[in-house]
Amino acid sequence: LPTPLSSRSSSLALVKDMTEAEAAPKKSRAELKAERGAQRAAAAAAKASTKEQEVVGPTLTINELEAAEFGNLHIQSHGSSGRVWTLVHELLPSLSNQQVWVRARVSTSRKQGKALCFMQLRHSMHTVQAVVSAKQGNMVGFAAAIPRESIVDVFGEVSLPNESVLSCTQKEVELQVQKIYCVSRAVPELPLQLEDASRSDADLAADMSLTRVNQDVRLNYRVIDLRTSANQGILRLQSAVCQLFRGYLLSQGFTEIHSPKLIRAASEGGADVFKVEYFGGDAYLAQSPQLYKQMALMADLERVFEVAPVFRSENSLTHRHMTEFTGLDMEMTFMEHYSEVLDMLDKTFVAVFDGLNETYKTEIEAVRQQHPFEDLRYRSPCLRLKYAEAMDLLRTKGPAKLEQMLADATEPLVIERLKERAATVGDHGDTEDIGTEDEKLLGEIIAEIYNQDFYMIDKFPMGLRPFYTMPDPEDNTFSNSYDIFIRGEEVTSGAQRIHDSEMLLEQAALKEVDLSSIQPYVDSFKYGAFPHAGGGIGLERVVMLFLGLPNIRKTSMFPRDPKRLTP
């Protein structure tokens, strides 16, 4: 028989779309592969829909719900129906035989003959099976033709299936659909399939034939990518970190402040700042709220914190750097020793970790299901080492650790780099800076010796810290400064700050820092200044490392780096 005209047209359109995609010069091979996979899935769905005699259904407003048991619901605030809603995660066996309204996305739909359609409905991280049967007539065809990711209103009766629905989070119930309305119809051809984007790292490692969605494709279509259960969990955990940080510090007498982000001079010094035109002159985006936190203390607020964006013009594409991130900053006065501030930071982190583990188990497990990780090991008070002690560990334990890694390495470039590091790590000096590779190596050593993933390193070399850092009182080669680490990566940097204006000028001169552009900051210490210290925490890094994720872009809703300014 000749091929139906509609099928020939669909095939020609698909070939044309695939040809155009392959010719696009700016798309990567992985992105083109993902798009072709999505197009093939859409073509298959369209073909199946044609065979099924698709039912379009009437278009209704909220005031016309009683006119049909299925259709396309156009919501333009015509009125209110008085419907009572039930969230997907609230669908439990205790609601058996009760009728409920649910609004959710169509995750999948599967038609069995003309008499039955199984749908998986998704809301946030939760899914439930909905069953449309032949007694609803054309409703089966209508439901089967709704594209994936469309939003629907479903009215149905909660029932208990004979066997658990293992593919859904609400395993012990299903919905017997009585009414269904499509509120928003997704386009048939999605740029990526959520099924592909949701595959676990373990499954991908075990089966190389599975479709992979690479990072650029995910970020280009971030709105869809964020719908995966893992990403839903990540964003909610990010929110939780902010809430727990804020809540604990408020309970300790802190005041939340909001410092300016347009400033006259670089807040941290150096060249890693974004310059913007400001009414014929120049201004900069703040690298941190550092100077303003200190000035707030001099204004007698005594304990302050801020949750706000931070901008760093660092031309870096590493797994842990972004040009814009969220800073969790705190600063406080102390009475006798800056260890009082270290104690506060320690307790704040523990409050955050405890709060996540106690209250956000569902979100943590949603992430773990796609990205397996070991629970963070921490204690209160946390492990604390001096910088010189940490460098001694690196020197004495590092070479053997690198030799173990070398024995397991197979790639020539990796082997060469490990040999270079093994030859030099044993000579690492007590005042020498520690790079990212050795930082992670030290983290592995500490984890093996102390069985801890969360720790502080105190007394950093003075030469590695900003001009406003207080020198150590016994050895000015070192300073009253510290970093906090999770799984071998730095998430917080802080110090006791110099609160004497003359000492501040001396240290600035030694480091050749011109303070004329921030004179109000210097002057704030001339009018009576409290001893004080604090730190800045990177929100996205904390979430990334708490969850053991490999890249900070996974914990930023819309990440910014030197090559990404959209979406």
Image: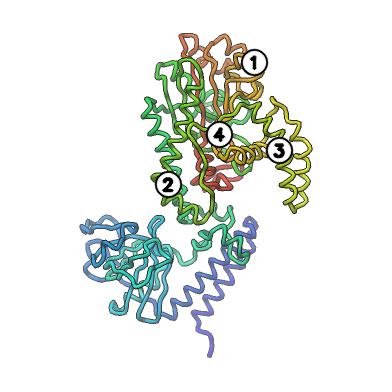
Q: Is residue 447 left or right of residue 378?
A: right
Disc with the residue nearer the chain's start (1 vs 4): 4
Bin the neighbour count of mark 1 within 10 Å (Cα to Cα): few under 14, some 14-19, many 20 and up: few
At horizontal 23% and vertical 59% (from top left) the residue drawn is 83
* Three-letter amino acid code at the position of disc 2: Arg
Residue at the image position 54 percent from the left and 72 percent from the top: 13
Across and down, in percent, residue 452 comes to 56, 39
How far separated are the C-alphas under marks 1 and 3? 27 Å
Residue linked to disc 2? 236
- Describe the element under mark 2 as helix, strand or loop: helix
Residue of label 4: 455
- How crowded pointer 2 is (Cα within 10 Å; few <14, some 14-19, many 20+) is rated as some
Give the mark nearer the N terminus: 2 vs 3: 2
C-alpha gap between disc 1 and disc 4: 23 Å
Disc 1 element? loop
Q: Dot 3: few (<14), some (14–19), or many (≥20) neighbours within 10 Å?
A: many
